[in-house]
Amino acid sequence: MREVLEGSQAVARTVARCRPGVVCAYPISPQTHIVEALSVMARTGELADCEYVNVESEFSAMSVSIGASAGGSRAYTATASQGLLYMAEAVYNAAGMGLPIVMTVANRAVGAPINIWNDHSDAMAMRDSGWLQLFAADNQEAADLHVIAFAVAEELGIPAMVCMDGFVLTHASDVVELPTAAQVDAFLPPYRPTQVLDIRHPTTIGTMAGPESFTETKYLQHLRFLDATGVIESWSERFREAFGREAGGLVARYDPDTLDRDRLAPPASSDDLVVVAMGSVIGTLQAALAPMRAAGIPVRLVGVSSFRPFPGDALREAVGASRHVMVIDRALELGSGGVLTGCVGRALAGTRSRLHSVVAGLGGRPILEASLQEAVRMALDGELGRLEFLDLREGGVPTPTAGATEVAR
Amino acid sequence: MTTVHIPFLQTGTLAVGGRLLDDAERSVQSHADRPSSLTKGHRACQGCAEALAARWVMDTAVEASDGKLVVANATGCLEVFSTLYPESAWKPPWIHSLFANAAAVATGIAASLHAQGRDDVRVLAQGGDGGTVDIGLAAVSGMFERNDDVLYVCYDNQGYMNTGVQRSSATPAAARTATTPAVGRSPGQAFGQGKSMVKIAMAHEIPYVASATPADLRDLEHKVRTAMSIRGARYLHVLVPCPVGWGSASSQSIALARAAVQSGIFPVVEARAGELTDVQRIRERADVEEYLRPQARFAHLFKPGGEDALARWRALADANIRRYDLLGERS
Amino acid sequence: MRQVRVHGRGGQGVVTAAEMLARAGFLAGHEAQAIPSFGSERTGAPVVSYCRFADVPLRTREPVLAPDVVLVQDPTLLASDRPFAGLAPGGLVIVNTTADAGAVRAEAGAQEADATVLTVPAMQITLTHLGRPKPAAAMLAAYAAASDDITLDAVQQVFRERFPGAVGEANAAAAAEAFAYVRDELAEVAAAAGSEA
């Protein structure tokens, strides 16, 4: 059923339909609406056979999830920004122990200065934590990705973050079609933990590994991560077959002219500028690039759906013969450039591609279609540098007018 | 327990044995088929009272739960000496996640078991004083406050022994540690610092709080059994002498634990829902010197200039004796 | 595509207004999207939210920069919050006030703006029916009365769904009254225009 739902509601209802055994919650904007909605469902019984635990910190939220997952339950939590960093130690720990927890990250900037608005700094800070990081382009995909995330995480024994842009998606209402409970039941296998604290088969989980075994442990974790690309593709394909729409995958391709998502879209050609992006800015790019294409401007769009594992092969295939790439980056590697750009650059190493890093939308600065179009024009005219800050106001920090947080109106 | 007259052939009433008793009257440890939850072959130091207490606590808990016990362990000596990959000294299902989160991990396990309808399986969390009183306090407090169905056991050796004997907020006054050296005008840990985890636990008004030492096996087992008979958040604080950290002979760990109790320095208590319900009286009062002198960390108290600190220690013992009526003078 | 901007203050249901508008627009057969202005949840602070309708899927995440319709839930924002800013030529501005359109234009410094300005005492109507200062239903009904984008039925339906029971009914009643008020106002405008011609 198509309906208008707030992104957080769409995610919460979908998570509930995945039948988690334990959900823990600690409030932090912009993730709060998700766990609020789940708390209601836990009380009304819509979320059955589930323990909903209000904890005292994000560190404990992840720790409770670790215990719950090791105890044999499908575990879910959600966080953002400072909260993700506050639980960082436990985030790494969950991955190291191979516990397939699923966590929504409502992407938000990291302070100081404190800022509650969207960018990708929080998830990027956890990029080497050993979690899968799947990015949603819109609220439909944000909801769908949770179903895929549980399936993939549990098959691999690797925890998964579903990243959705804070406020831009979490608080926006869109027309979505949620997977029904029956559809999810048919699609998602019941939780069968690969390692569990079982009194009949006692195991020790979380031992110390010395220098003689740590390297091999990490190497095996690396191999498992390499497996993850195939597993993500496979479950995303099964999702498309079961639900009739594309979600997840490694790299999202878009029709050259309609800019509709289309896995069969051809790779870019040698004349094309390829814009690579991740998260909700893809929607704005779809809207911004379609008229440019109609005007004959050679520009293509490629979306990164799986940031971890980073799909180097799939990205190279989508970029095709193009050697000119512009990356829209919502997180900054200080002194260097966009974080996503670094990964794209590594994937394109040896291809002699020209790469632009366009840092945009930090701390909730709206990314405007006109600004993106201008960046594309400049890139094609050879006027865009290797590192650019979209809509940067030079000459110091501007003082906002009272109440104006998003854009000059 | 009924009173049984037995020949006084063993070394005192607090002895571990009890093998002259009927089976039903014996301690868990004196049974031939004790669970030995923490098996031999681990890497604890000679004379480690934590290893001893942990085995006693867990054996009792395993027995009380009919073998249905799951354990979450904080980082620390106990974790490091028992589980160096690929070996494990633990018989029950056991998990170690992090230093500060054993209580929260235990909450997660309990929530998971409850969601699966497995309330017959019980959950025990354990850690040292660092993982409980310092870095893990928020998670412990959260678990208490929610009254999660977890027994949390703190093995208090009064410092960060695993990292080389640094001060914790459970380190006693005047004690020398690597970060409170016995130099300067007030050597060792400052007077007036530290916190009582037993009082903090009581302030949460959880169903059961108790303290114990490995000097009294019967009492320790009794408290674990009592804790296991109750649902909700429970806390047991066990003083565990550490030969390395305390600078004591490895043969003296039990004697030191006993001296801590008999001098009034470590009150052995029970509390329910925030109310003190039982206090173990001092049987044979010991001077604080009996507790302090065998420990190198207090050596400076017995050198010229240490008189004042020693007097303050006596005052601490006296204050405990008054506060908890350890000599039974009020009753 | 039709783009709407809602101005109000924290506590007046500005974000809810955009969401309800999107739902009503969806019921009217459009693709719809509501975007709150993000952040400050303080009561009384100026808040803006946005809504879009289209007959193709809505993809952009850009805030509404050039609204076709502006709803002002609090007349004290007319001077400070620049509600006419970016308004598309011939746009519609509906203001919750007991003053008339001329006074609204003067207050907003928009005497010359190419816009249709309608006023509706939405707060009075809402307080009568609901007893609480949340004029979203009345404002959306006023919008329904002045355009074909949404209908009164749809507005009433989405409020009844969102607030089942007495609150939903009170909102529906407020919506009906505001709708009738604006239809009368439009009839007067039309009559005045007719007599001038």
Image: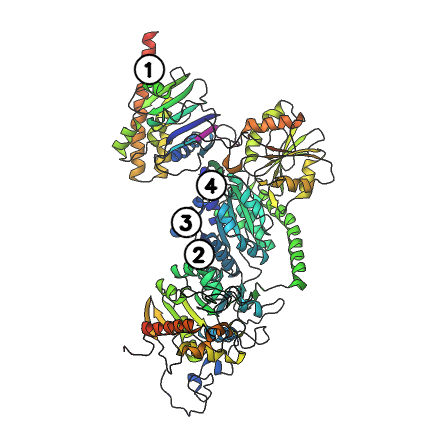
Residue that protrudes farthest toward the left in the picture: C128
Sequence-wise first label, 3 or 2: 3
Query: In the image, which is nearer the foreground, mark 1 or mark 2?
Result: 1
Sequence-wise first label, 4 or 2: 2
Labels 4 and 2 share a subunit: yes
Quick check: A381 left or right of C9? right
Q: Mark 1: which secondary structure? A: helix
Quick check: A247 left or right of A406? right
Q: Give the answer, above or below, for where B282 lies relative to C168.
A: below
Looking at the rendered structure, the kind of residue marked 4 is Ile
- The answer to whether the residue labelled 1 contacts the one labelled 2, judged by CB atoms less than 8 Å apart, is no
Q: Residue tagged by mark 4?
A: A116
Separation of disc 3 and disc 4 at Cα?
A: 26 Å
The numbered mark 2 sits on a residue in which chain?
A: A
Labels 1 and 2 share a subunit: no
Residue that protrudes farthest toward the top in the picture: C197
Q: Give the answer, above or below, for where A238 lies relative to B23.
A: above
Secondary structure character of the magenta stretch overall: loop
Q: Mark 3: which secondary structure? A: helix
- The answer to whether the residue labelled 3 contacts the one labelled 2, judged by CB atoms less than 8 Å apart, is no
- Front one among B155 and C77: B155
Labels 1 and 4 share a subunit: no
Q: Give the answer, above or below, for where B59 lies relative to C9.
A: below
Q: Which mark is residue A49?
A: 2
Looking at the rendered structure, the kind of residue marked 2 is Asp
